[in-house]
């Protein structure tokens, strides 16, 4: 495993782009909602097609937003907007 620290929202590189087998992944830091609440976006972009002509697809959502728990309204059964609380 390679660990990359990517948490400088004011730096020149707000997007970390990762190329992998079957997909590219973007991690975008330093974004804010209209109220100024910070969030990070993670996008999984399947290759359609890849260099060998193979089309890849994903199960589930291709984009996830991560934000401070204090700004997410709780919902029944220990979930928040469909995501399990950890």
Image (tube, rainbow, N blue to C red):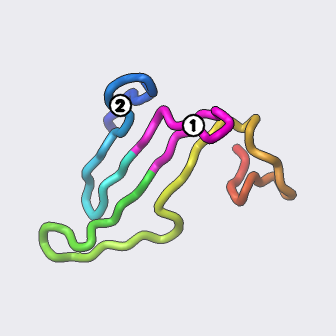
- Of helix, strand and loop, which one carries label 2? loop
Q: Position of residue 86 (x, y in %)?
A: 70, 43
- Write down the region rendered in magenta: 27-42
Find disc 1 in the rendering and name its residue: 32
Side (left or right) of 65 relative to 42: right
**In which quadrant of the rendered view does residue 38 lie?**
top right
- Of helix, strand and loop, which one carries label 1? strand
Residue occupying image coordinates x 83% and y 55%: 75
Q: Is residue 58 above or below residue 65?
A: below
Q: Which mark is residue 4?
A: 2
Residue occupying image coordinates x 74% and y 44%: 72
Give 65 or 4, whichever is nearer the viewer.
Answer: 65
Residue 80, magenta (yes or no): no
Residue occupying image coordinates x 46% and y 35%: 29
Q: Position of residue 47 (x, y in %)?
A: 27, 67
Residue 28, magenta (yes or no): yes
């Amino acid at each position: 495993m390679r660990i990359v620290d990517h948490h400088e929202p004011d730096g020149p590189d707000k997007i970390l782009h990762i190329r992998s087998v079957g997909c590219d992944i973007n991690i975008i830091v330093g974004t804010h909602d209209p109220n100024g609440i910070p969030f990070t976006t993670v996008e999984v972009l399947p290759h359609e097609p890849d260099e060998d002509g193979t089309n890849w697809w994903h199960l589930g959502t291709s984009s996830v937003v991560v934000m401070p728990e204090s700004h997410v309204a709780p919902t029944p059964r220990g979930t928040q907007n469909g995501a399990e609380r950890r």
